[in-house]
Amino acid sequence: MNKTIAVIKGDGIGPEIVGETVKILDTVAEKFGHTFTYVDAPMGGNAIDAFGVPLPDSSLETCLKADSVLLGAVGGPKWDDQPSANRPERGLLKLRGAMKLYTNIRPARMFSELSDACPLRADIAARGIDFVVVRELIGGVYFGEHRTEEADGEQKATDIMAYSEHEIRRVAHVAFQMAQKRRKRVTSIDKANVLDTSRLWRKNVTEVAREYPDVELLHMYVDNAAMQIVRDPSQFDVIVTENLFGDILSDECAMITGSMGLLPSASIGEGGFGLYEPAGGSAPDIAGKGIANPIAQILSVAMMLRYSLNEPQAAYAIEAAVTDTLAAREVTADLARAAGTKPLNTREMGDAICRRLA
């Protein structure tokens, strides 16, 4: 296999964790006889500094021509004063739209070896955490009209949330097909008691569910879901929800597993074309200190190999290497206290996983 991967190192800890992940990909290439060609694609705050915009046309072209895209993280307080349309995150939204990445997949899994890092009560954590959030990614309020205007002597801001039936149905199919390979339960999260978009969401998800009679469908309001995720996360198998709710809930799901540094994220469009990144952000407070946890980024390339490059064996090898490393209590600073061991730095963590992968 010979594939081209666009690499967006991004901001904050992005370059550090991407560097370790490329090292993992190189080990995969050697182990399985593949060739990966990496092409840099600046995006985010660093692109604003260098080019004046968060996503230069050249970077967008690089991503669209690649077989897959690897992203570190974008953003940070340095660029908080940028106009709304030119903030680092706008580059990511533009890229998702251009790549037509309508589905985001975020696994929420607690590694049993690190259950002490779970912030939930021990009896709740003991039931286990292993579910997936499937989030619609290029519709809803993030892609609606945004405006701020003067009205009656004061400023008035408006953000439009809109969904069409086909946007809802295509992401619902992803969720049900995923549930068929897991524990056969989908929980659809909305706010149908208040929002028209949520009523349309519920109607279409219910109709799609009829095509999957082997999968149980439950509906849940988003405020209740936020509570249930911390009360008993073991009840969930596959969660499907719209863009804004998914953005918020998926971060909550990540934190209950013990660390944002453990959980990957995949954004996928038609034909498996995708963008892969960690679930956490750019963490500017620890950037450059060599203490960032690269596991989420490393696991994101396992998802890349599985969903975009059709290499499930290589994906499994990475996941097994990560599990074995954690079982050996080799962890970074965010998990060292729970593991009861001395922390590794970012490079040492990457090396430890590489050794087991090789």
Image (cartoon, rainbow, N blue to C red):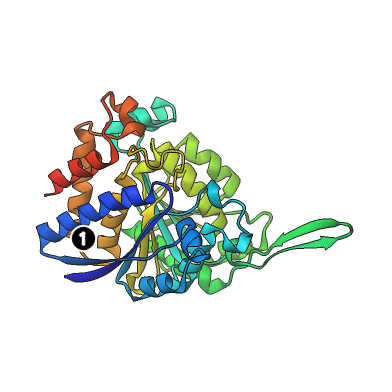
| Residue 185 image point, x, y percent | 40, 53
Q: Is residue 265 visible?
A: no
In this rendering, the answer to whether 65 lies above or below 193 is below
Quick check: 192 left or right of 70? right
Of 308 and 335, which appears nearest the observer?
335
In this rendering, the answer to whether 341 lies above or below 18 is above
Quadrant in the rendering for residue 276: bottom left
Of 235 and 254, which appears nearest the observer?
254
In this rendering, the answer to whether 197 lies above or below 254 is below
Q: Residue furthest front?
A: 50
Q: Which residue is mark 1?
A: 312
For image coordinates 67% across by 63% down, the residue present is 196
| Residue 259 image point, x, y percent | 39, 38
Name which residue type carries label 1: Pro
Quick check: 203 left or right of 196? left
| Residue 273 image point, x, y percent | 35, 70
Quick check: 334 left or right of 160? left
Quadrant in the rendering for residue 37: bottom left
> What is the total number of numbered labels drawn onto the structure image?
1
For image coordinates 30% across by 38% down, the residue present is 111
| Residue 197 image point, x, y percent | 63, 63
Q: Secondary structure at mark 1?
A: helix
For image coordinates 53% across by 65% down, the residue present is 52
Quadrant in the rendering for residue 26: bottom left
Q: Residue furthest top?
A: 340
